[in-house]
Image (tube, rainbow, N blue to C red):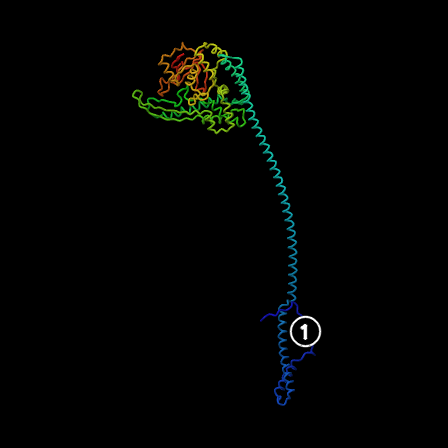
Amino acid sequence: MKNIRTKPTIKAPRVLSEAVRIPKELLHKIHGKAEDTSGGRNEQEESPQQYAENRIQETAQRSGRKAKEHGKQAIRKIRDAVKKNTPSQTTKTRANSARRSVRSARHAAKRTVKTTAKRTVKSVRHTVKTARNTVKASRRAVRTAKAAVKTAKMAAKAAVTAAKTAAKITMAIVKAVIAAVKALVAAIAAGGWVVLLVILIVVVVIILVVFLMGIFFADESGGLSVSETAAQVNEDFRLAIDTQISGLSAGGDYDKVNIIYDGNMDGDSDAVNNWRDILIVFSGSRMANGEPSIELTEESLEELRHIFYAMNTVSYRTEVVQDTEQGNILNIYVTIDNKTWQEGAELFAFDKNQMQIAEELARPDYYPLLAELLGTDIYGGMTNGEMTDIISGLPQGTKGTVIVQEALTRLGHPYSQPLRGQGDYVDCSYLTWWAYKQAGIDIPTTSVEQARYCQENGRNVGRSELQPGDLVFWSKTTCGCGRWNEIHHVGIYAGNNQVIEASSSKGCVVIQKLWGLDGGKWQVYSFARPDI
């Protein structure tokens, strides 16, 4: 059945009083009487008017009864709907209580939310404020750190710049001293005495340069000097070669073992001393980094050793030969690649600043200094008086004197067999060939060919006949390379038992006492005077 919508509140139906109500019995009687009357009445006896009135009355009564029944039904439905949709007093009370509880809960929730929110917001605001303060402090710290870094960089840059400037100033002072010495020599001397004065004043220059530059000295704590370091490294290097040779010759049934050093046929040693070039590379690397004064600490010594082994590499090869007279022969070929400072600079990828320093130190003005630092006395330990005796004792107007004087101008010049004739590089036979060339005399260009030429042309002389400008030849008695009489070295006799030679063992041109007269690995083979 379709529900009837009602208003939320409906008043109770109105109850009629007893007086105005029509009793049910009366209604039934009236209704029954009317039916009896209508049923028993003779329609013919009624007049038309009476008939119409009766019909209207009956219709009205039926309509009234139907309306009454419909009204009752409607009232019952309304009551049922009202009863159904209208809550009881308990229900209303409970509902009101629930509403109050809901309202109370809402208010409590609102208060809780509001309080919690306020506290949370306050806490968040405090956290944000703390974070902002932290960020500000961090920014200040960062700014302080940046400022410190900037200051440190500026200080470091200033220090490096100052060091480089100091190095440049030192170089400039050294150049000025050397230029002044040269000017002084040119102004006050002439002839053969120039050589003597140059030698004497170069000693002063060395002292000045060492004092000004202060490089390559043993530290005050008792460290090694450059010369001691070089000697120690050379000993280790030689020991490693000897160990390798022993290993190659061990275990074989050989009647003879020949050790042949390839590529070093004109010199007084098996290995070339290229320490001058090593020091130039070492100095160029260190001084370019703002270190004009270099102490040989453990770190720098290790760096120096590393540069040495990078610029001196060794390779080996063996050969077995059957000889009818000597039997089974083992030839061990040892090749030592002694690099120059130019090759070292390329090996270590020198930049512009490093190259400038290296080029400066490689100039002839520094030859005596570098030799002195390495413990190489290019003057053979002679005093000023002894040097004066040699210069003054040279015979006037002879080619021999010219040869000696020219050879003395090459003191300290670097040794290199591959680079002989390039720049100031010489080896022993190139020095003799060049000095003789200055005197207008042509001789062969290698030591063995010069010795052979002199012997075959009757130019040999005895030791007692030696004169300044004569040639001295040495043979290497332990070599089995097959050279003519194993001639490997040559020098120029300077007088007073002194000889000028380009020494591979010392790495430069030196003057020293005549040696190799008492036997040993190196022996004087002959003296000669070609076309003097």
Q: Among all residues in the image, which is located at the extreme front?
A: 440
**Residue at left 61%, top 37%?**
143
At which x and y percent is residue 51? Answer: 63, 86
Instruction: Pick whichever, 300 or 30, lies toward us.
Output: 300
Residue that badge 1 annotates: 14
Numbered disc 1: secondary structure: loop
At which x and y percent is residue 223? Answer: 51, 23
Residue 484 vs residue 426: left or right?
left
Instruction: Pick whichever, 176 or 361, lies toward us.
Output: 176
Residue 449 vs residue 340: left or right?
left
At which x and y percent is residue 328? Answer: 32, 23
Q: Quadrant of the N terminus?
A: bottom right
Q: Quadrant of the C terminus?
A: top left
**Residue at left 36%, top 12%?**
458
The residue carrying pointer 1 sits among few (fewer than 14), some (14 to 19) or many (20 or more) residues within 10 Å by Cα, namely few
Write down the quadrant of residue 399 in the picture. Answer: top left
Write down the quadrant of residue 97 in the picture. Answer: bottom right
Residue 503 vs residue 148: left or right?
left
Instruction: Pick whichever, 184 or 39, lies toward us.
Output: 184
Instruction: Pick whichever, 176 or 497, lies toward us.
Output: 176
**Residue at left 59%, top 33%?**
150
Numbered circles on residues, count:
1
At which x and y percent is residue 483? Answer: 36, 19
34 w.r.t. 128: above or below: below
Q: What residue type is disc 1 on?
A: Arg
**Residue at left 37%, top 24%?**
333
Q: Among all residues in the image, which is located at the extreme left?
A: 324
